[in-house]
Image (cartoon, rainbow, N blue to C red):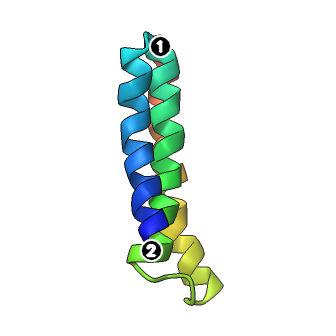
């Protein structure tokens, strides 16, 4: 469980460190999109305890993040 906390903290700190290192805004946007999916999977599996849930329920709980990120990414690329 401690490793999950560390992974979530690293996912939270990575965009801030990248921004301070001078990363381009478009790189930061896509980095945040990717990290949202990673964080969602960790949260669903470990904190919602869906690891042992039936596959359909687990998929439904994990599928919302990529769907939302894809929708936001679509709007981001249009503008």
| Residue found 46% across the figure and 64% down from its top | 4
| Residue found 56% across the figure and 82% down from its top | 51
Residue 74: percent from the left, percent from the top? Answer: 52, 30
Question: Label 1's element?
Answer: loop
Residue 67: percent from the left, percent from the top? Answer: 52, 51
Most foreground residue, 35 or 65? 35
| Residue found 45% across the figure and 71% down from its top | 44
Q: Which mark is residue 61?
A: none
Q: Quick check: 43 above or below 8?
A: below
Q: Which mark is residue 1?
A: 2
Question: Label 2's element?
Answer: loop
Residue 20: percent from the left, percent from the top? Answer: 36, 16
Most foreground residue, 71 or 31? 31
Q: Quick check: 54 above or below 24?
A: below
Residue 49: percent from the left, percent from the top? Answer: 45, 83
Counting every numbered tag in the picture gives 2
Residue 23 seen in this snapshot: yes
- Tell me which label, 2 or 1, sits earlier in the chain: 2
| Residue found 41% across the figure and 54% down from its top | 8
Most foreground residue, 6 or 44? 6
The C terminus - image quarter: top left
Left or right: where does residue 21 sit relative to residue 60?
Answer: left
Residue 67 seen in this snapshot: no
Residue 76, quarter of picture? top left
Q: Residue furthest right?
A: 55
Alpha-carbon span between mark 2 and mark 1: 31 Å
Q: Quick check: 57 above or below 78?
A: below
Which residue matches tag 1?
23
The N terminus - image quarter: bottom left
Most foreground residue, 30 or 68? 30
Disc 1 residue crowd, few under 14, some 14–19, many 20+, Cα 10 Å:
few
């Amino acid at each position: 469980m401690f490793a999950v906390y560390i992974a979530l903290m690293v996912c939270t700190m990575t965009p801030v460190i990248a921004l301070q290192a001078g990363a381009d805004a478009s790189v930061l946007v896509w980095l945040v999109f990717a990290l949202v999916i990673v964080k969602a999977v960790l949260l669903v599996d470990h904190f919602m305890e869906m690891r042992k849930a039936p596959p359909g329920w687990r998929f439904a709980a994990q599928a919302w993040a990529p769907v939302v990120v894809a929708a936001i990414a679509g709007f981001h690329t249009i503008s």
